[in-house]
Image (cartoon, rainbow, N blue to C red):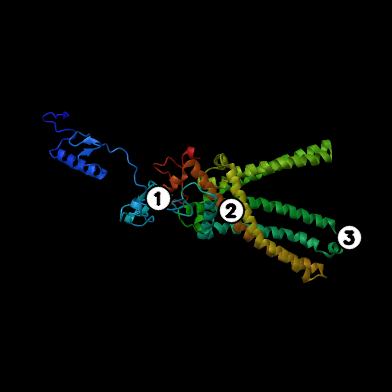
Amino acid sequence: MTDQPSTPPGDSGPGAENGDAPAQDAGQGADRTAASGQPAGQSNGRPAGSFAPPASPGWQAPPQQGWGAAGQGPGVPPTGAWGQALPAPGTPGATGMPGAPEPAGYGQTPGPGGQPGAPWGYAPPPKPGVVPLRPLGIGDLLDGAFQTIRRNAGATLGLSVIVQLVSGIAAALLTLPLFSVVGTPEVLSGADPDFGALAGSLLTLLGGSLLAGLVSVFLLVIVQGAVTIPVLRAVLNRKTGFGQAWRILRPAIGRLLLVALLYLAAGLAALALCAGIVTLVALNAGSGAAFTTAAIVLILAIPTVVWVWVRLAFTAHAVVAERLSAPRALARSFTLVKASWWRCFGILLLTAIIVGVVASLITSPLSMAGGMIGGFVAPEDPTAMVDFLVKFSFITTIITAIATGLGFAYQCAVTTLLYTDLRIRRDGFDLALLHEFDAGIDAPIPGLAPAPGTGYDAGAPGAR
């Protein structure tokens, strides 16, 4: 007879913490014995009534579901619990609970009805006007310039077209003396021509063209400053009329003329230097060396001129937008382009190509039509043909001036927005503009008023 282990008084066995624990263990043991197919009197080979430690649950393989379940292969979508297919995203129960809404995506806040909303902590940059108040891309520049011209056609196109018309008419009038000499019967018939009159007409044409070019330089600098005003105001969605833009520009005209004089003096000095070098070589080494020297000077001069042109491209804008003197505006333009020369060069070159292509599409057909029509008007009367060509050239010059004025206004608008982008990247100019817009400040030129809390003050020397 086997001795049974006795249980100390007050101890009802392992796990006996409640009064009904032994009864529950007994019932569960009986069930496990019956389920295992063993006799009721034995449990795992032990006699009935002997002590059996509680069975450890151990590890059991979970029921297969999802990928790799029975009967599933590659390409079969996963299934949910108990072999049920998962509902499609966005439908009730997509999270595995019947009727549960689709959760918001990562980084998003749930909107009305549990639908995904805006990402956490994201707010789009404000866009009160033609461009958003952030660093601008090439698409923002090209589209913003077009939108500015569309909304402020008088202020942007008016002065530019007028200046180009004046320059074009002056150039057309200057060519009349040359045409009058070339169109004489003596020259056209090959008889003894009056070379003195022809030379005088050529000199008149060259001198007049030089004078017209100088005047155009002054006027185009003023156009650059004038277009700056409506473009900057359009950034804050403010319309500008032609008269209003002219009144705002008037105090800066003297400084713009000084900038044009500095441009002219620098250009003449560069031409004199190059011509002096070539002439000096020609006098001392002959024509062959002079030709080689001229080629070398030209190769070196072209990149230098382009580099200086890009560095000084924003001088007129700085004069008007920041009320700087001419020397300080030159330095300001140099500073703005310092770290963005290649980007500015690419954008300015692309804009010039676009404007040139559009202008050529307008003017080239006219020039070709004039040459073709002139041969049919009076093929046997050279004088009448020259007279027709003079009149047609005058009309073509006016149309070309209008097309050039439109293109130059668009080019100035792109340059102004590029100038604004450089100030945003360097000075935080967008914060100053946003402050003015939020405060409802309608300054004649945006950005001149200090913006509290932004760290930018247009009147401070460091902002220059």
Q: Amino acid at mark 2?
A: Gln
Give 372 or 44, whichever is nearer the viewer. Answer: 44
- Left or right of 185 in this view: 306: left
Q: Which residue is mark 2?
A: 411
Give x and y (percent) for residue 440: 39, 52
Q: Is residue 76 left or right of residue 162?
A: left
Q: Total label count? A: 3
* Residue 226 at least partly seen: no
Is label 1 or label 2 in front?
A: 1
Circles 1 and 2 in contact, beta carbons < 8 Å: no
Mark 1 or 3, closer to the camera? 1
The answer to whether residue 346 is above or below residue 87 is above
Dot 1 falls on a residue whose secondary structure is: loop
Q: Label 2, secondary structure: give it.
A: helix
For the residues labelled 1 and 2, the Cα–Cα distance comes to 69 Å
**C-alpha separation, residue under disc 2 versus residue under disc 3:** 49 Å
* In the depicted structure, whether residue 384 falls above or below residue 275: below
Res 302 → quadrant: top right
Image quarter hosting the N terminus: top left
Residues under labels 1 and 3: Cα distance? Answer: 109 Å
- Residue 192: image tag: 3
